[in-house]
Image: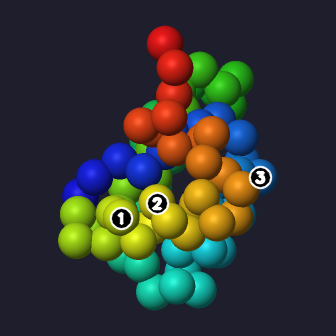
Amino acid sequence: MRQLLATNNMVTISVVESLLRQAGVIYQVLDQNMSVLEGSIGIIPRRIMVDSDQWERARKLMTDAGLELELTDNVKN
């Protein structure tokens, strides 16, 4: 699996999950339990991972939906 994005924004997570589900892309949301343990103060972002074989397709879905700035490989440090 390969990381598509990481965010604390629940709306973004919901939209991304919906897009991936509708397109039949295999994905998994990681760190949900850690987010609950830290008291929901938003310190630990949830990561959306996609099957490595479908990463390019998932990335294109996000770009087409206007979410390219949310992608892990577009984050500027």
Determine which quarter of the picture holds residue 28: bottom left
Nearest the viewer among 12 and 10 is 12
Residue 64 placement, left or right of 29: right
Residue, disc 2: 59
Foreground disc of the pair 2, 3: 2
Which disc is residue 21 wearing?
A: none
As helix, strand or loop, the secondary structure at mark 1 comes to helix
Residue 29 location, x and y as percent? 45, 56
Amino acid at the residue labelled 2: Arg
Residue 9 placement, left or right of 58: right
Quadrant of the drawing holding the N terminus: bottom left
Residue depicted at 51% across the width and 28% down the height: 75
Residue, disc 1: 56
* Mark 2 or mark 3: whose residue is earlier in sequence: 3
Q: Are marks 1 and 2 in contact (CB under 8 Å)?
A: yes
Which disc is residue 11 wearing?
A: 3
As helix, strand or loop, the secondary structure at mark 3 comes to helix
Spatial CA distance of label 1 from label 3 is 22 Å
Residue depicted at 66% across the width and 26% down the height: 42
Residue depicted at 55% across the width and 69% down the height: 61
Nearest the viewer among 27 and 33 is 27
Residue 25, above or below 49: below
